[in-house]
């Protein structure tokens, strides 16, 4: 079916009746060759044939331009697709790195909890001044680790949102391409049906 449509489009140009125009031109040429009319009538008929031929050449040129434009558009789509693939790969790598950072933050937090437990044991010893000093230092470190954890979680959330946007863009692009292919298929079928009538 696609081969039939392709041949029909090659013969009929953009569907504007070029095949009929060529058939009429051939018939006119044959009639002109065997015509026994006056030279004026022959010249008029000759001019008409030149006009029809110019229309066919114009349609052919337009078809070639459209074909070349479609080739460039396909190359552009392939480049966009490659860029999207690269972006997805990069996003996966960033997400994996964020997960590693979260695991490190969890280990740090676990260590922090163990430090707190040790601090409680130290508080039971007589040197409270030194113990309090250590507790303050540990608390400061805990706050810093908490900020690091929050930053890592914020970064992971941002990466998730970026990845979601990227996937949405891919789906929209795929939908656009499918719609374009369907539209081209429908137009080809309409042209085939019109020429068939």
Image (cartoon, grey):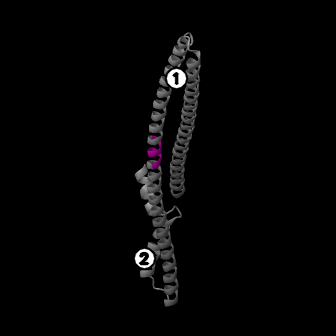
188 relative to 51, above or below:
above
Comparing 155 with 127, the one in front is 127
Q: How far is disc 2 from disc 1 in space, using C-alphas? A: 94 Å
Comparing 7 with 77, the one in front is 77
26 relative to 140, above or below:
below
Image depth: mark 2 or mark 1 in front: 1
Residue at the extreme left: 3
Kindly indicate whether the residue at mark 1 contacts the one at mark 2 (C-beta within 8 angstroms): no
Q: Mark 2 or 1 closer to N-term?
A: 2
Residue 172 in magenta stretch: no
166 relative to 189, above or below:
above
Helix, strand or loop status at disc 2: helix
Comparing 39 with 19, the one in front is 19
Q: Residue at x 44, y 44 (%)?
A: 85
* Residue 61 percent coordinates (x, y): 47, 70
Residue under label 2: 30
Which region shows up in magenta?
83-88
Q: Residue at x 55, y 23 (%)?
A: 138
Residue under label 1: 109
């Amino acid at each position: 079916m696609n081969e039939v449509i392709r041949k029909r489009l090659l013969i009929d140009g953009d569907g504007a009746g070029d095949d009929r125009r060529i058939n009429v031109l051939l018939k006119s040429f044959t009639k002109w060759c065997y015509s026994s009319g006056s030279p004026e009538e022959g010249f008029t008929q000759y001019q008409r044939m030149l006009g029809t031929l110019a229309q066919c050449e114009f349609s052919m040129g337009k078809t070639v331009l459209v074909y070349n434009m479609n080739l460039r558009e396909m190359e552009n789509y392939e480049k966009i697709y490659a860029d999207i693939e690269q972006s997805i790969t990069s996003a996966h790598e960033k997400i994996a790195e964020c997960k590693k950072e979260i695991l490190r933050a969890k280990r740090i937090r676990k260590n922090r909890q163990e430090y707190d437990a040790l601090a409680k044991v130290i508080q039971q010893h007589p040197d409270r001044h030194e113990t309090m000093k250590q507790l303050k230092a540990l608390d400061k470190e805990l706050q810093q680790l908490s900020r690091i954890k929050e930053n890592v979680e914020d970064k992971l959330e941002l990466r998730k949102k970026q990845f979601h946007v990227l996937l949405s863009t891919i789906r929209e692009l795929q939908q656009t391409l499918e719609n374009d292919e369907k539209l081209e298929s429908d137009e080809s079928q309409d042209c085939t049906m019109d020429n068939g009538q």
